[in-house]
Image (cartoon, rainbow, N blue to C red):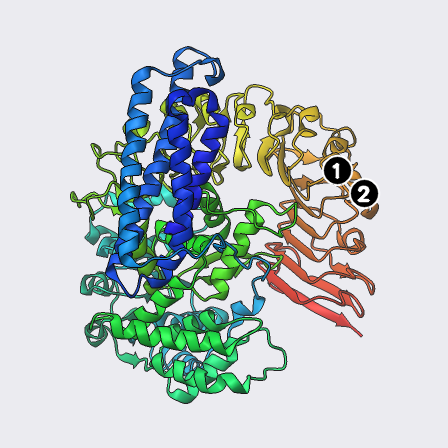
Amino acid sequence: MAAETTIMFAVKNIDDLLIEQAGFLQGVEDQVKRLKDELQRLQRFVKDAAQKQGRDKRIFKWISDVRDAAQDADSIADAFVLKVEAAGRSIGGSSGKLLHLPKHSYKLIGKQIEAIRDKLRGIEKSRKKCGIVDLGEGMEYYVSWRSKFSPRQMNKQLVGMDENVEFFLEHVVLDDSDEGLSIATVVGPGGVGKSTLARRIYDGAVAAGRFDRCVWLAVSGEYTPKDVIKEVMLQLLHPQHDKMKEAESLEELPLSEIQGLLHRSLRDARLFLVIDDVGQDAQWEAIASVFTIEDEGSRLLLTSRNEDIAKDAGSYVHKMSTLDPNKSWELFTNNIFIDNVDGKFPEDLEIIGKEILKKCDGLPLAIDLVVGLLGDENPSKSKWDEVLNDINTLSHSSSGSSTILSTILELSYRDLPPQLKSCFLCLGFFKERVPIRAEKLVQVWIAQGLVVPLEGGGEKETKEEIGMCYLNELINRNMVQVKDLSTDGRVKNCCIHDLVRELSVTRAKTEISFEIQREDEKSRTSDKKPRHLAIHGYTSGDQHEHVHSLFFHGVISNFLDDLKSFELLKILDFEDLPIEKIPETIGLLTRLRYLGLRNTRIESLPESMGRLKNLEVLDITKVDQVEMDDVIWEMESLRHLYGGVIYSQYLLKTHTLKNIQTLGYIYVENLIPAHLMEMSNLRKLSLLITVSVDFDGRKFYPFLAMLENLAWLEIKWGPFAKVQLSELKGLDVLHRVTRLKLEGIIANLPDTCEFPPNLSYLTLLRTCYDKDPMPVLEKLPKLVYLKMDRAYSSSDDMVISEEGFPALEILCLFRMVTLDNILILQGAMPKLKDLRIIGCGKNLETNLWG
């Protein structure tokens, strides 16, 4: 993390140590206090150093030394707590029963503290030589989290795209005059908009409905030719296929066999395939060998920075050019004040704005980043002057190989507040060119300790809400892009441009000891021990005692044998890996805050999980069923248990989970209803009810009604269960619930008045209801979103009456194959903005009665 934040969290960690472990510090307590004071004093100088580091290499070195010293202090605090916990386990009790640690432990800690203080004395001497001054205590850790993400970020004004999109669709992609295979390539420098153009073309092709299959594949320099072919194969699979199993079987085959499989699977099929950012000749050659000129009606579209690939690849090559001054200005003015309703551009800023745009060389990415730098509700001439001067200064001081794009990227990073700098550095932890779940990104920030309640924030603002505001600000600065939104307009998935990711990774390697480790790379990128690792192939024998976060992006090999050597680990992410078992040694990772087991093959969780007192997030989503001992109650810090389906042979005690916000899916028979009332922060609960359970909603739901924060309830019935009306009776007591999802075969819907009275979002999944549900649902007065997926099994018409759905804005009707007709009477759904009908009856019509 950035030096400012590194010190801040080191001080907080030491402060917690002084409070929580005061009884065990004994002879080193004074040394710990002095270390904390000296670190706090450094905070007064770091801000000045951060502003000057671009002008003096000595200051850059000074900041690096400060960061290292703060990280060492942070590690000492963590290591001391580990010693206390280990000693507690050794006598079979809690740490509270210990009177002291062995004398040699105190001597070692004392020596380590003095070594850091020696470093700090050297740092103080260097500070004076570098002319770094005290800017006072007014260090700004403020992030303008009140500014919300603007939905218009999803629909930014693009310039110079429409004509190219129309030409491609008409003359290249959808041209029937060319009955064989057609290949086109879009080439140009990084940041010129190749991927944006290709995505617009792809969306147009999908909407046209002329192809049997459409596939978008974003590759990277890390992709081998085999990876490219394998990914195309996996994307062509039916959604119900086990992609993990298929990926494993393909991994065992040689490239030539996978190419043969792909060729045979595409026989007689019209395919539109986009391969974004082909960088290697070998990547293109692997694809080219699969297709022949006789492949009827198929279309391939490549994007690449490599013009040589374009020469070999296709019959049509489109070279993207940079924007001319007029189009640059149009792009800039369309987006700089994105929420400015009247669209007027302040006259005093126009001259400076045009000078800044000259520096951007017509690159859309550079213009976007400048927009992010300058965008403000109250733009000031002084700020714009400062940006222009910084661009000039930084471009002149950079090496000859530096581009204007790298200069503006660097300036965008420097302009971030300290906490946002640290959050930005975490972006490199995730897989390249793969969408990032916003929810996961925020949880990683929280686990790192980067999300801090801010002065002036509401008392009920959660860390998740504050973290989403951090993400919104990165989006508004155009350093992160929105991939898609949730139904209520929040960012669901995001992504980052390749060049932005390169900056994140480069900076993270320097500033937070981040390392990307590959199985075929035996040497480290630096002499420093990594604190954060992204592993694409694990090699045992490395030193792990300093690692705080670990993300697996490939084969894990024998990692689980080395689990106990990662004692300081806070984040451990196995997502999308075919692991089947977590060993008991997981219980030794007592500092762990985030454990990602999403889309793995885990069948059970060991009893030792109960030792993870600091675990805040356990993600077992997309795992069929996970058996767990009665240990949840021991994880007192748990905030989110994302399911999956959690199963136990025991009643699960949950009365200690005061912090939990998300719980599910969990079998009703495993719950103690009275314990639910103790989970005062619970916001989302997902329940599973089996056919063998005698469930009475009128007795159960009143327990949920006691939870003042419960806003989201999901209820799922087992595959052989047919929901009885008694199981839905009583929902009307849930006054705080605004979101409801019901999944399972329903014989009868409750009356309108028996739904939660403030219901805004309703999803009916696999309900197979055989009567028209609209007479009941259309009377829900506050419903703004309704999704029905395989929810209706009759061939009778659905009818929405004149006053039906007074507040509804989004209606989704999916996969109801017997539904041929919807009758919508005049005056119905007056606020409807979005109607989505997918996979329903072939003759489905929407009739508007006048």
Q: Is residue 354 left or right of residue 320?
A: right
Q: Nearer the viewer, residue 237 or 329?
A: 329
Residue type marked 2:
Glu
Q: Position of residue 640 (x, y in %)?
A: 54, 38
Q: Position of residue 656 (x, y in %)?
A: 60, 26
Q: Is residue 766 above or below residue 99?
A: below
Q: Is residue 488 left or right of residue 702?
A: left
Nearest to N terminus: mark 1 or mark 2: 1
Residue 651 seen in the figure: yes
Q: Is residue 473 above or below residue 650?
A: below
Task: Kindly indicate whether the residue at mark 2 contacts the one at mark 1 (C-beta within 8 angstroms).
Answer: yes
Q: Residue at x 78, y 56 (%)?
A: 778
Q: Secondary structure at mark 2?
A: helix
Mark 1 Cα shell of 10 Å, populated few (<14), some (14-19), many (≥20): many
Residue 201 seen in the figure: no
Q: Nearer the viewer, residue 645 or 423?
A: 423
Label annotation for residue 728: 1
Distance of mark 1 from mark 2, alpha carbons?
8 Å
Label annotation for residue 754: 2
To which quarter of the image does residue 507 belong? bottom left
Q: Nearer the viewer, residue 741 or 109?
A: 109
To which quarter of the image does residue 193 belong? bottom left
